[in-house]
Image (tube, rainbow, N blue to C red):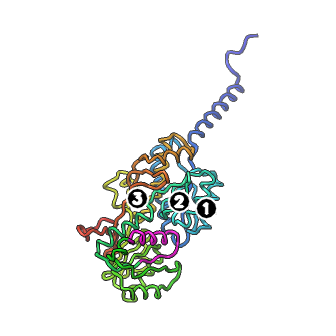
Amino acid sequence: MKAALWPSLKEVIVVRHLVLALLCFALGAWAQPVLIGFQGPLTGPWAVEGDWALKSVQIAVEIVNARGGILGRPIQLVVEDDGGTPKGGTLAAQKLIAAGVKFVVGTYGSMVCMPSSELYEEEGVLHINYGCTRVDLSARGFQYYFRTSGRDDSQARFFVEYVIPLFGAKRIAVMHDNTAYSLGVAEDVLRFMKPLLDEGKVELVYYDAIMPGERDYTPALTALRDANPDIWYYTGYYPEWALLLRQGKDLGLDWNKIKAVGSNACPISETVKIAGLDAVVGAMITQEPLPAFLVEKYPLAKEFVTAYEAKFGPIHDSPWATYAADAIFTLAFAIEATKSFDPAVVAEYLRSGKVVGEGITGPLSFSPEGDRLGVPYMLLICNEKGETELFDPAVHGHLVGM
């Protein structure tokens, strides 16, 4: 009997199913998403920062995915709320690790970052924080830890070497809240100010801490008023900063007479919402560049701001949220360059000091310790409309912020 020239219907169906199965497998493997975790304070006292950061990360993910993803694979975010507490940070890290995430963006707050980053390090998860600036975070010898933001010592140096001379201030007041971040900045201010103190060029007339979360700071403000400083630097977070400005104003303190300067954890927009415009006008903050200051300098900044405003409305005045988005771009650039999804390979590449790409905030490169290189600072002021303005004697009054 001669062999059949054509396969039977049953054989055709079997082959078709086999081909479809192989095709589906190939397509599925090709399109398998890259899981990237996001950890941030979506609840708690810093929830607005967490919300801004998550939105910014979502925009960055959309931009990367629209360009074809990372090595042809789309990013899929896995989101965990840490509530802005160390315990919450630990729980969020445990959940992300359990979900199989190998790359994480987060978080806001050095005291939250400390325990969660230890867990990521133990599990070999590459961790890029966006709003944790305590100096010693990068002094632990970790392999997988990075940050896209600057460090407290850079901000403290800027205050001492630029802000104090700018106003010719002689009588200096420094207030912190004993949290890891706030105390770190305050201690660095004292360290950089020591030569000026030793030479008698300035006098430290007030140095003390408040308790975060309280509702009445009248005793601390009364002591501050009696110290009669030329300039007052508060190194804590915006919820307390807003109350301090409000209650200080009610006590008769004048921010034109006493230069009130908050840290980079005190966004002016949120401070105005909490304290009221009349209490914040003239108050300043030391800050990294905001997205609105960068659109003419970096193409990705313009693309990011345009996409953010189209989806969420006016862009935030938080550098931290922007650094969170830049953490996504850092991962995308580094994975593409190494052609590897192995956190160890990507981490080694990031520690080389090479510029991995140009992000929203400029060239992205890191020290062997994982610190972001080349982060600038500026002095911002709340104008009479409650807007964030760049303070510069040469251009003061010209709106360059939001």
Task: Give the residue at x 63% y 37%.
Answer: 25
The one of 193 and 45 positioned closer to us in this rendering:
193
Per the model, the C-alpha gap separating discs 2 and 3 is 24 Å
Residue on which the image places disc 2: 106
Which SS class for mark 2? loop
> Is 110 rendered above or below residue 58?
below
The one of 309 and 126 positioned closer to us in this rendering:
126
Which SS class for mark 3? helix
Can residue 280 be seen here? The reply is no
Counting residues from the start of the chain, the first of labels 2 and 1 encountered is: 1
Per the model, the C-alpha gap separating discs 2 and 1 is 10 Å
- Is residue 188 shown in magenta? yes
Per the model, the C-alpha gap separating discs 3 and 1 is 30 Å
Residue on which the image places disc 1: 92
Can residue 251 be seen here? The reply is yes
The one of 335 and 139 positioned closer to us in this rendering:
139
> Is 45 rendered above or below residue 342?
below
User: Which one is in front in this view, the residue at disc 3 or the one at disc 1?
Assistant: 1
Residue on which the image places disc 3: 310
Q: Would you say the residues marked 2 and 1 are in contact, meaning their CB atoms lie under 8 Å apart?
A: yes
Question: What type is the residue that disc 3 sits on?
Answer: Ala
Q: Quadrant of residue 226?
A: bottom left
Q: Residues within 10 Å of mark 3 (few under 14, many from 20)?
A: few
- Is residue 261 shown in magenta? no
Place of residue 347 in the rendered image (x, y in percent of width and height, measured from the top left): 53, 48
Place of residue 223 in the rendered image (x, y in percent of width and height, measured from the top left): 43, 87
Q: Quadrant of residue 169?
A: bottom left
Q: Which mark is residue 168?
A: none
Q: Residue furthest left?
A: 394
Q: Would you say the residues marked 3 and 1 are in contact, meaning their CB atoms lie under 8 Å apart?
A: no
Q: Residue furthest top?
A: 1
Q: Would you say the residues marked 2 and 3 are in contact, meaning their CB atoms lie under 8 Å apart?
A: no
